[in-house]
Image: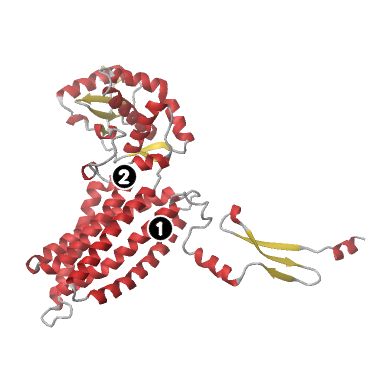
Amino acid sequence: MGGENSNSEQIVVEEWAGSSPTKLSITATISSTPTISIQRFDSRFKLVRRQILSAFVPEGFPSSVTPDYVPFQIWDSLQGLSTYIRMMLSTQALLSAIGVGEKSATVIGATFQWFLRDLTGMLGGILFTFYQGSNLDSNAKMWRLVADLLNDLGMLMDLISPLFPSAFVFILCLGSLSRSFTGVASGATRAALTQHFALQNNAADISAKEGSQETVATMAGMVLGMCLAHVTRGYSLAIWFSFLSLTMFHMYANYKAVRCLSLKALNGERTSLLLQHFMKTGQVLSAEKVSTEEQVLPLWLNPWSSKKFKCLHSHINLGVKVSSLNHAEMMDLFRSAGSNYKKAKCLLLENNGIISIVLHKDSTPVDILQSYIHALVMVNLSDKSTSGHVESFSWMDKYYEDFIKKLQSSGWKTERLLSHSVVWRANWFIAQSDEKID
């Protein structure tokens, strides 16, 4: 009887494919009776399409990345395309100025000029990293935009260099210096954004696929740039019109790209926006709403910024050097340290509307975030009351835990504050008989 059942039963194996467990579709069925047979549901075109797509989008797309990944990549690819088209125009002008194609030009002269250009760029990259390297994570949006603006400036220098033969090398080095800043800032912010997009610890996959997308944009831009350079050759007005038009589009595409981003890591500005809204309404804004209010350019470059929220974070100095404090701040420091030496992980000092945060040497990332929020509360309350310092302690005791819980429930990352590197810290104690009292 068992033999008859096994002969009459038909085993069927189904083949499924998809970018994620929720996006699966059946592609084939394989049956074993009377002979092994395969029935395919996917056409060869769909199979090839899936394989090609897998080279450009992360595995598990779209559930493996954040919702802002697609709009950002679209605008980022468009700005990259315009960059490589313009690069062909600026490179053509640069090679012409060096003397390519002219009998009077010497190889050693052109080599030396190119050497100075590259050397200036290398030194500029090191200096930029020294002065701003620790600040790139906390302001990824702003530096991403600034990086591309500097790249525009560098290509502009290349294009105008032939117009000033006597200052050619100087202009050439300025352009290289500008692009060196671009390389450092763009690379660092890209790493931060890749971590933001990765929902399934797939940052490496996202980075690899982003490289494929950029390669396609590069090849397309080079081909179009070659065509444009050939068409406009010898027509200065056409070259400048094309370059400036593409530059305007490049700036617009970059602005749209960074505006698409809804970063959930807390930096100074995002924390300030969230806190002000919470103190008014008791609710926490979503990352999408905060992104519409967030500045993507330095304040001095954006005088038309929204006045809905105050820039509380601009009144705070985090991790100040104790020995640099003035006499009044020193006296305030000793008073605060004397009354809080056992439990405090930070000391807040107020002077002319500026809050200086002195961090304890044992303070953790969570302590730093709490001290920063406390300073923001103090600045906000000081605008409304003369006793803002005292009221800020009361507010922290009453509302801080609720604020953090609502941030976490809304998807915000509260493990740390994205800020510049904190180098200076302090320790305070009451000395008795040359011994520390813990």
Residue that carries the numbered disc 1 in the rendered image: 74
* Amino acid type, residue under disc 1 in the picture: Ile
| Mark 2 vs mark 1: in front | 1
Q: Is residue 350 left or right of residue 193?
A: left
Question: How crowded is the residue under tag 1: few (<14 C-alpha within 10 Å), some, or many (20+)?
Answer: some
The residue at the point 37 percent across, 23 percent down is: 396
Whether residue 362 is visible: no
Displayed quadrant of residue 438: top left
Whether residue 217 is visible: yes
Is the N terminus in the top left, top right, bottom left or bottom right quadrant?
Answer: bottom right
Tag 2 near tag 1, CB within 8 Å: no
Please report whichever mark, 2 or 1, sits nearer to the chain's N-terminal start.
1
Residue that carries the numbered disc 2 in the rendered image: 139
67 is higher (above) or lower (below) than 16:
above
Displayed quadrant of residue 108: bottom left
The residue at the point 25 percent across, 35 percent down is: 314
Residue nearer the viewer, 121 or 93: 93
Question: How crowded is the residue under tag 2: few (<14 C-alpha within 10 Å), some, or many (20+)?
Answer: many
Q: How far separated are the C-alphas under marks 2 and 1? A: 22 Å
The residue at the point 14 percent across, 66 percent down is: 161
Identity of the residue furthest to the left in this view:
166
Displayed quadrant of residue 204: bottom left
